[in-house]
Amino acid sequence: MAQDNAQREGKQAPASRRPEACAIVIFGASGDLTGRKLVPALYNLFANRMAPESFYICGAARSELSDEEFRAKMHAAVEQSGGDMAAWDDFAARLHYQSVIYDDPGSYQALAERLDRLDQEHEVPGNRIFECAIPPTLYMTVARMLAQSGLSGEERGWRRLVVEKPFGSDLASSQELNQAICQGFEEHQVFRIDHYLAKETVQNIMMFRFANAIFEPLWNRNYIEQVSILSAETLGVEHRAGYYEKAGVLRDMFQNHMMQLLALVAAEPPSIFAADRVRDEKTKLFRSLRPFPTDQLYDYLVLAQYEAGDLDGREYPAYRAEPGVDPSSLTPTYATMKVFVDNWRWQGVPFYITSGKRLAQKLTRIEIQFREVPHSLFRQVLGEEIKANRLVLNIQPNEEITLYFQAKQPGGEVDLRTVGLHFEYQDGAARQGLEAYEKALADAMLGDQMLFWRQDGVDLCWAFLDPVLEACESCGDRADRLHRYRAGSWGPRDAAKLWPGHPLNHLERY
Ligand code: BG6
């Protein structure tokens, strides 16, 4: 218990510690996420000796599969993910499967009995992680059944629930889901995954801000003119039209990943680097978001949808022509939003947040645009305009940080050029980073909630976005307000009018 309390306070041991013996029960074990992400991540943790000494995985899903059939499926999945198969036989011996009907109490009874037997076989003292790799419509059912069957109780070992986004589709549904989860689990047992938070360079934002003395004094309205947060994807809707048609870019990317990036850039320093202290600061930041001016919605928001176009020499269809999409769909696949944080540090500084599908490049980037020099002593020769400093934090695909500043052009003229101080994340690194799911699962096993959403943050972000979604979805001229952009472009021109740092205004930077 002492350890549990320490964990609740966020005083976790360093990540290099090996987790305690535990079982990982994956609901949705025959689905895409399990084979594509979860089992390859667990395999890599195992192969790199970062999984517990004693552990096992129990896949659970509707399909009838034997342990052997499940192992064969997972073998193919791990091989396809490019894993080195040297540790496979040892790993495979820890893979089991139990078929379940998600709303049938008898299935949970049988699962509980099976897990008790497997605990004995693998010398696991009852510690269990329940991972929900199921469609979101089943989250509530599974959470309730875990509570009702007693599987969530911590009488023998700890129990944790890992939930994937989306956490509801608005504030009311998110709270309803949380109530179902709370029937069996307390907040310290719930791990709401945001895979952006587990990306190494996203984690690095806090280290960069708070482990260096030179940036923090400048990190405020006195020196910063604007902040841009961009997550551009080349992928389209893929095979997810059923979900995406209802979600659109605001629910899919803004309510979660983009809000986390905003919080990491803008939150105050916590007094210690501990899960709940960090999450407290994020919560304060979310509370400081200026309510979106829905009466002037489109002065602050540009929504758009991709048209047909080409990218890297390939033709792509319009969003409306993608499989499963309504041919007259008004779902936005792109948004640029201008938001303000009403607090002492950020008053008046615009944050431009953008995300879109089928754009010109895969790129997640945060740009801090500093203010211009207060007085230019070079104005007689150079004019008024001296480019202000700019700090670029590239999250993916290239993980790098560049600080741009002015330097003299070599030669007899008085002339300036913009140069960059550049750092690449893997340069000189002592070890390889962890892939996002590896990090998330390792932390869930260690009980470290630092990189997971807490419910108050989820609620606050929905409370911020709900009025925006309602205004967009109910406005009479919705179709006229939805801009179009060509697949493979940088998005609609109107977004470049709203956001001065838009790639279309600075193509040389991309
Ligand atoms: C997911 C969204 O959460 O993040 C997807 O549902 C999106 O629509 C994905 O493609 C982007 O993640 P990443 O890691 O590729 O930037």
Image (tube, rainbow, N blue to C red):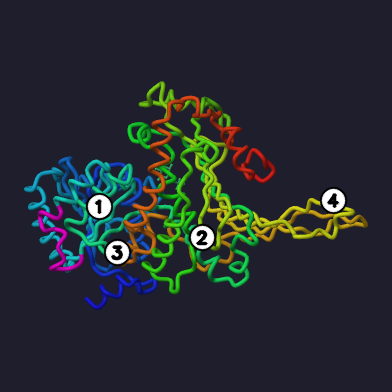
Q: Amino acid at mark 1?
A: Asn
- Do tag 3 and tag 2 residues touch (Cβ < 8 Å)? no
Q: Quadrant of the N terminus?
A: bottom left
User: Going from the N terminus, do you reach mark 3 or mark 2 first?
Assistant: 2
Q: CA distance from mark 2 to mark 1?
A: 29 Å
Nearest the viewer among 222 and 271 is 222
Magenta residues?
A: 146-158
The numbered mark at residue 366 is none
Q: Check disc 2 and report the residue beneath it.
A: 343
User: Going from the N terminus, do you reach mark 4 or mark 2 first?
Assistant: 2
Q: Check disc 3 and report the residue beneath it.
A: 445
Q: Is mark 4 within 8 Å of ligand 1?
A: no
- Do tag 4 and tag 2 residues touch (Cβ < 8 Å)? no
Vertically, is 270 above or below 230?
A: below
Q: Amino acid at mark 2?
A: Asn
Q: CA distance from mark 4 to mark 1?
A: 58 Å
